[in-house]
Structure formats: C-alpha cells, structure tokens
Amino acid sequence: MANKKKIGLFFGAGAEMGYGLPSGGKFALDIFKMPKQEDKDYFSKMINKIDLQSQIATSNWLPADFKDKRLFVFGKGNFEDIISSSLENRRDSILGFFDNFDRNVSHILANWDIDEQQLQRSFTEKTQLDFGEKLYSQVAVLNDKFAKHSSIFSSEYFSAFLKLIEMFPKEANRISIISTCFLEFFIGSLGEDLVSDLNQQLFKKTPPKIEIFDNLANPFSLNYSATGQNGLAIVLDEDDEKTVKTTDTTMTIFNKLAKDILSNLYAQNLDYQSLIDSHFRYLYKPSSEWAKFTRISIFFIFCQTLYYFSIR
C-alpha cells in the first residue's frame, strides 16, 4: 500500500498563520463574506437523500416536513449578537487596538505595495501639511470617565483621516463613513467597560445580612442595535483585493487604508466563537429549532470547504 500523505493543522494563538492559514478572526470574516448558496445546495441534497421510512426520519428527531423546510444561514441578522459579544468579551483588546492605532497601521502597511513614507508624502502633497503636524488630542476630548483611553486622538493616522475630512469633506466622504465606524466601535467598547464597572460596583457599602443587595445583578446594559454593525457590513460587503499604487490619488490611498484598518480591527476582535457556542446545542434539536440547526450545520459545511481550499 502506498504511503498516504499526512497533513497537520495548527490552531491556537495564531499558530495557523505561519502555515498560510487564515487567523481565526479572518477565517470568520471570510465565512460571513462568501456566498453560501453552494453549501445550502449541498446540505439540501443531504437532506433529500434521507429515506422517509428510515429511523432517523420517523423518530421525531427531524420535523415531519423537513424536506420542504427552508434552509437558513448566518447573515446580517446575526450581526448585533456578534458585535455585542465582541464588545463585552473583547473590549480590552479592542481598546488596546485603538490605544496602539499607529502601530497597528504600520503593521498593515508592511504588507502594502507602497511604504509609509510614500503614503505620508501623498498626504503632505494633498494637504500641504507635514504628516503628524496636526493632531486632535486637544480639540477632541473624551468625557473624564474615559480619559485613560484618549490616545486615539493623538494618533497620527487617525488625525490624518480627520484632517482629510475637515479639509475635503466631499472627497473624503468614504473616509468619513469608515471613521464614524471606528468611533462607534471605540465608544461602544468604552461604554461596555464603564457599564461593567458600574454593575460590579453598584454600592460602596451594603448591610452584610440583607440579601436584596446581592439580587441586583447587572442592572445596566448597552443597546447594540447600531454599534459596530455598519463597520461590519462594510468589511463583509466589499472586495478586499484591490491594491493601491504610488500613482493613485491621496483619497484612493487613504480610502484603502481606512478599509484595511477596519478589516484588521474586526479580524482581531470579532467574537465569532460566541455565535458558534450559542448555536452548537441545536445540532441535536432539528425538530424544535430547525432554523438554528440548519444555520450551524451549513456553517460547519462551509468551514470544511474553506479550510480545504486554504490548505491546497
């Protein structure tokens, strides 16, 4: 018998990235971004192959009309859950991203076709200002409760976005939209941090033998109906493949930069695990939770397909 090739997959703490595989966050974004129809069709064929007289079909594990039921996939309707979980569970990482905004940008630019000096020179030619000459740390000041995370407005790159918006509002409309997304995610993380502190420190003192004070569990929460969802829609709905050249306009270059930073922010901090965890149990409940069952089932089919092509 001929020897079979062995394939090893490395997961955890970014180990997979050294082998050309996408990071967990990037992988999740790819899954949400790519069309699902092929995987829905594949799952539909699997369902239609089930013998209606078989035990699996007659045991009430599947709904009676399972072959005629609609199939569901994860999509925009799940964005709010993903964002709220990300802000709750990854808020320190998100705030760290904004506190080190320029460092993150430099890391992104290391993989670009143009270098930082060329990009900064393009900014100077457009604005007649030295890059980093004008910062917003004294004109955009956060509430004192958030003071420990105010370095975003000292960022040279974020200040460059704001300066382009200020000087060329019509040309910089795209940059303005993405910068708003940055601020939504930033403020959402600050709010979650503050709410968490409030919920943990409702009283300075409480009577030790009166239990009603212990029954006030997490009375404060945030509304995530808009926070971060516009940014996620931009990342998922648009093509990432376009590259920029030194001959491109300043706005083209900075539009691409803003989009790449936004994608990187979500790739690093998207809490996709919570979505999987919240649906995994429904793999065993197709009869009562058909929509959630099909979402997680098709998700795993898509994961298998995407990783197959990643390792080829």
Image: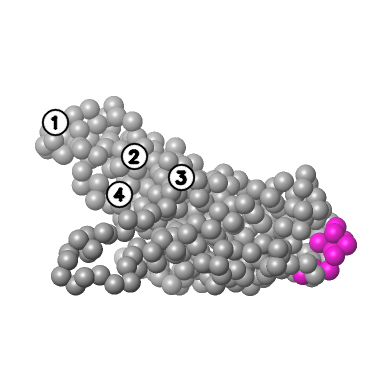
Residue sitting nearer the eye, 278 or 188: 188
Report the front residue among 4 and 151. Answer: 151
| Callout 3–callout 4 Cβ contact below 8 Å | no
Numbered disc 2: secondary structure: helix
Q: Mark 4 — residue?
A: 279
Q: Check residue 30 for magenta coloring.
A: no
What residue is pinned by disc 1? 53
Q: Which residue corresponds to mark 3?
A: 225
- Rounded to the nearest angstrom, the CA distance separating label 1 from label 3 is 45 Å
Q: Choose the circle earlier in sequence order: 1 or 4.
A: 1
Residue 131 placement (x, y as % from top left)? 79, 68
Label 4, secondary structure: give it.
helix
Distance between mark 3 and mark 4 Cα atoms = 21 Å
- Left or right: residue 210 compared with residue 9: left
What is the spatial separation of the Cα atoms under label 4 and label 2, in whole angstroms?
17 Å
Q: In the picture, which quadrant includes the N terminus?
A: bottom left
Mark 1–mark 2 distance (CA, rounded to whole Å): 20 Å
As displayed, is residue 35 above or below residue 275?
Answer: above
**Which secondary structure lies at badge 3?**
loop
Q: Position of residue 84 (x, y in %)?
A: 42, 53
* Frontmost residue, 161 versus 141: 141
Q: Amino acid at mark 4?
A: His
Q: Nearer the viewer, residue 241 or 277?
A: 277
Q: CA distance from mark 1 to mark 4?
A: 29 Å
Tell me the mark number nearer the camera, choosing from 4 and 2. 4
Dot in front, 2 or 3? 3
Left or right side of 300 for 35? right
Q: Which residue is mark 2?
A: 43
In 3D space, how far apart are the residues under numbered discs 2 and 3 (Cα atoms)?
31 Å
